Image: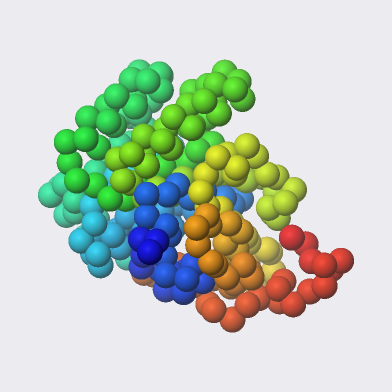
Amino acid sequence: MIELTKTGIDGLDQILNGGIVKNSTTLVSGNPGAGKSILGLQYIYNGVELFDEKGIYLSFEENEEDIREAAESIGFENWADHVENGDIKVFDKQVLLRENDFTSSLDLLLDDIQDEDYQRMVLDSLTMFQLFFENEQEKRTYLLKFTDILRKNELTTLMTNEQGAVFPDTDIGLENYLTDGNIYLIQTPTESGVNRYVWVAKMRKQNIETDIFPMEIEHGGITVHQNASAFSMMSEDESPI
């Protein structure tokens, strides 16, 4: 029986057929503004609020105050309280980039992972994380090492990844193949704003809905609608994916 970790995000757990595989690492990719960081915040926050699971939030792009303000602005009012009591541990860019060395940052992180009982982790973002490394081989080696450490410490992890292309198959990197699952957040412009979609492309050990589903970002976070989008009804020749 495969154990699952529920995201607590309306609609997403349903298309994941129950949740994310426990102790796995899932890549969440999308272009700027697609909702990657919000999904990560919501995953960590729901862990504490709904499932009594503590979380670690790593940000290579924001400081702790910015993260708190972002969480509270979307409706996660108890974020600061959870950080204060230790249910959410935040490592911000000032901490992670202090030594400008991945090994030092990893040692700092491992102390907390091993001393406390955390179940969830978010790394935001892999794009900035990769700046530690000089070439693809070094990046691959450390990413494999890092995901192995997370798995051994029984952390179910989301890693966000900046994607330049609107549609996934035009911009697939090595990191997509080194993780257990791939979730794409897609946004397309309209005359009145943007339409947003989520596509779960891969989840090892798990039967998933592989259609593309509409999603919304409102106060309270992300909601995924379970009626498949028009993308799913296109012929292969017409489909942009």
**Quadrant the N terminus occupies:** bottom left
Measured along the vertical axis of the image, is residue 219 above or below residue 169?
A: below
> Where in the figure is residue 11, as x and y percent of width and height?
46, 74
Residue at 87% x, 66% y: name it: 237
Return the x and y of residue 220 as percentages of the image width and height: 36, 69
Q: Position of residue 100 (x, y in %)?
A: 41, 19
User: Which colour style is shown?
Assistant: rainbow
Location of residue 196 (image quadrant): bottom right
Q: Is residue 192 left or right of residue 121?
A: right
Residue under the point 53% across and 77% down: 225
Q: Is residue 118 left or right of residue 30?
A: left
Question: Residue 233: horizontal and vertical position, in percent?
Answer: 74, 77
What residue is shown at x 44% (from left), y 43% (from top)? Answer: 124
Number of callouts in the render?
A: 0
Residue 74 appears in view:
no
Residue at screen point 24% across, 43% down? 89
State the residue lying farthest toward the right: 237
Quadrant in the picture for the C terminus: bottom right
Front residue (pair 140, 123): 140
Q: Is residue 184 above or below residue 60?
A: below
The residue closer to the viewer here, 22 or 160, is 22
Q: Residue furthest bottom?
A: 227
- Indicate whether 10 appears above or below 172: below
Tell me, yes or no, if residue 30 can be seen here: yes
